[in-house]
Image (tube, grey):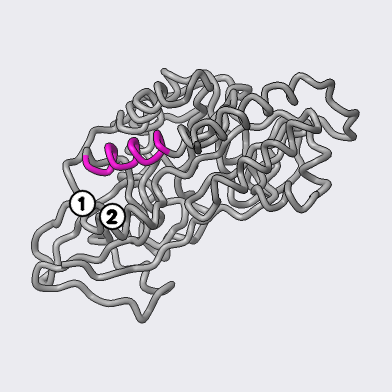
Amino acid sequence: MRSSRRSALWLLFALAACVAPRERRHARVVLCDAGQVLAGDERALAAGRVVLRVEERDSDRDLEAAVATLARLGIPHAWWLEVARSPSLADAHPEHMASLQGHDEWRVLAPDAPRAADGSVLKVHPWVPLTTAEGFELQRARLAARLAALPPADEVYLADLQGAPSACGCGHPRCRWATDYFLATPDSPRAISSGTPLGPEAAARFVAALRPAARGATLIPVWMAECDEADELCHGVPCFAGACWPALARQWAPLVAENERLAVLVLEPARVERELAALVHLERPNSPPIALDRTRLVPVVAAELPGAIQLLTDLEQSFDVRLWR
């Protein structure tokens, strides 16, 4: 019965999409949640294209209803899938969450967080990156099932293909280059792995592995730039000249080679051109040089800018630190 109902809904979406679209004041692309569409948010309903957020908090029923609303108005839709941040996987498989075993500067943001000792490790809840073989397969299966439950779209954006925020322990929200960065201490003399590490091609491999579940949709990887010397968000950790940017380059290069279109999530509108420029031309020691056409990158930002996807909703990027033994 559920399968028949879903098939009927998808047929309705396809037929409705054939109706001539209404005249709209804007041809911009926006990223919003299903609730905004269902509430009649004019910023979404006046757009030329709507990218719908799909996080675990977003129900399939609301998403289907939002797509039906957009189809009646002749507005095409795409999906924005959150990859690494998964409360359900984090709770079911806490051992595969990213860890904090490196610098301690993140504690200025969470001074009451616990401390690891005697074989325990601090985990970044609810982030389960695809950078380990175990996390890769768990996320692939979860998102393949989610795509199967949703109406088809011609584009699917895959967000958070990197590690968890504050990857090295610096506290920077864009530090995403590692999963189990480790610095030995008397209390923690050895690293505790979150799983079997994959190489820098993990994100590119994940996009390819999910393609069969996309039902013909174009998969568009979403990336974030790393920290910056002028940020002052690394809390004294000299990350910019260290391992982070070369690691990012080694992860970014396979995506650039295998995907024509790429999106860049920018947390601060004033930094759009700066962060795009950093990813367009990237040359660091011990890393592959990268040079690509700026037009291949689509910024995603909470501002109305030419050629950008305007972010109208919140995207969960938060984490809390939990002790795991």
Q: Is residue 138 magenta?
A: yes
Residue at image x 57%, y 19%? 293
Spot occupied by residue 324 in the image (x, y as percentages of width and height): 21, 67
Residue at image x 53%, y 28%? 262
In which quadrant of the rendered view does residue 253 lie?
A: top left
Disc 1 secondary structure class? loop
Q: Is residue 106 magenta?
A: no
- Check the image and report above or below for 249 versus 43: above
- Check the image and report above or below for 254 versus 242: above
Spot occupied by residue 12 in the image (x, y as percentages of width and height): 68, 27
Check whether the beta carbons of the residues at disc 2 and disc 1 lie within 8 A of each other: yes
Left/right placement of residue 174 relative to residue 65 reads left
- The C terminus: image quadrant: bottom left
Stretch of the chain drawn in magenta:
134-145
Mark 2: amino acid: Met
What secondary structure characterizes most of the magenta part?
helix
In which quadrant of the rendered view does residue 256 lie?
A: top left
Can you tell which mark lies on residue 194? Answer: 1
Mark 1: amino acid: Ser
Residue that mark 2 sits on: 97
For this rendering, which residue is in front, 65 or 37? 65
In which quadrant of the rendered view does residue 249 lie?
A: top left
